[in-house]
Amino acid sequence: MRPTGCTRTVLILAVWSAVSTLLHAQSPESLFERANAAYQSGDFAGAEKLYRQVLDAGINNGVVWYNAGNAYFKQKKLGSAIYCWEKAKRRLPLDPDIRANLELANLLVVDRIEVAPEPLFVRWLNRGIHLLTPEQESWAFLLLFTAGGIFAAIAIRARRPATALRALIAAGLTAALALCFAGSFGWKAYESAFLRRGVVVAEKADIRSGPGTDNITVVTIHEGMQLRVLGQTQDWLQVSLPNGWAGWLPSETVWIL
C-alpha cells in the first residue's frame, strides 16, 4: 500500500522533528546546560565529558574552561584543572574566581622549585601586559587610533592656537596609548608562537636526558607543574623547568597551553 500525500507529510514532519530534536540535543548551548546540570547533581565525570564536547565544538569560552576546571578539580585531577583554569584566565584575565582557584591549586602542587623572584618592575609589566585579552587590545588600539586621527584633524583645522594645541596634545597621548596596546598585542603574539608553556597532567612523570625511555631520569615531577616547551620530536617534548633544568617528557603527560 502506497502512502497518501497526507501520510507522506506526516512522515516528513516526524523525521524533521526528530532531526531537529537531535540537533538541539547536540548544540553547544544544550551541551553546556546539560554539563551544568550534571555538575550540580554531583556527576563530575559526566560534566567533564560534556564540557569537553562544548570546547571541541569550537566554543573557546572562558566560562566553559572555568567550569571544566572545576569538574576536573572535583575529581582530584589537579593538573587538568590547572590547565583549564589557565586557559580560562587567558580569556577572562580579570576574573577573581579564576585567580583564586589557581592560587589554591598551585598550593596543592607537590613539586616546589625555588627560583629567584623577578624584579618588581618586571612583575608589574608582565601583569599589565596580560591585563586584557588580545581581542580587547585590538579593539582598544582601533578606538585609540581613530580618536588620534580625529584629534589630529581638529589640530590641523582649528583656527584658535589654544584649541589646536590641546587637540595636538590629545592626539599625542592617544597615539602613545595605541602604541602601548600594539606592543602588548605583539608580545602576546610572540609568546603564543615562541614561548609555549604546558601543564603536567599525569600523576607523575620522569624528565629524561633524551627522547626515549632508554635515557636516564633527570628528575621526577608531578601533576600541576607548569613548564616551558622548547621543542618536540615524535612522542616526546623537550621541556624546561622554572629553575632552568631541561629534559624530555612523553607528550601525553603534558597539555600545551
Image (spheres, grey):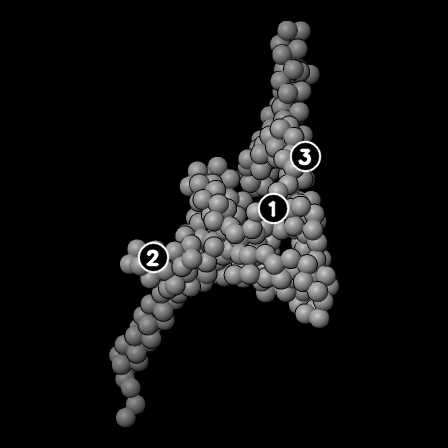
Q: Residue at x 38, y 56 (%)?
A: 74
**Closer to viewer: mark 3 or mark 1:** 1
Q: Tag on residue 183?
A: 3
Query: At numbered mark 3, what does the secondary structure look like: helix, strand or loop?
Result: helix
Q: Residue at x 70, y 54 (%)?
A: 246
Q: Residue at x 58, y 34 (%)?
A: 127
Kindly report the distance in space between the C-alpha atoms of the residues bearing marks 3 and 2.
41 Å
Kindly report the distance in space between the C-alpha atoms of the residues bearing marks 3 and 1.
31 Å
Quarter holding residue 146: top right
Type of residue at label 3?
A: Gly
Q: Earlier in the sequence, mark 3 or mark 2?
A: 2
Q: Is residue 214 left or right of residue 71?
A: right
Query: At numbered mark 2, what does the secondary structure look like: helix, strand or loop?
Result: helix
**Quarter in which the N terminus is drawn:** bottom left
Image coordinates of residue 42 in percent, x first then y, are 31, 59
Image coordinates of residue 14 in percent, x first then y, are 30, 74
Kindly report the distance in space between the C-alpha atoms of the residues bearing marks 1 and 2.
34 Å
Q: Confirm or deny contact between disc 3 and disc 2 (CB under 8 A).
A: no
Foreground residue among 175 and 35: 35
Image coordinates of residue 60 in percent, x first then y, are 50, 53
Q: Tag on residue 113?
A: 1
**Closer to viewer: mark 3 or mark 2:** 2
Q: Which residue is mark 2?
A: 39
Type of residue at label 1?
A: Ile
Quarter holding residue 180: top right
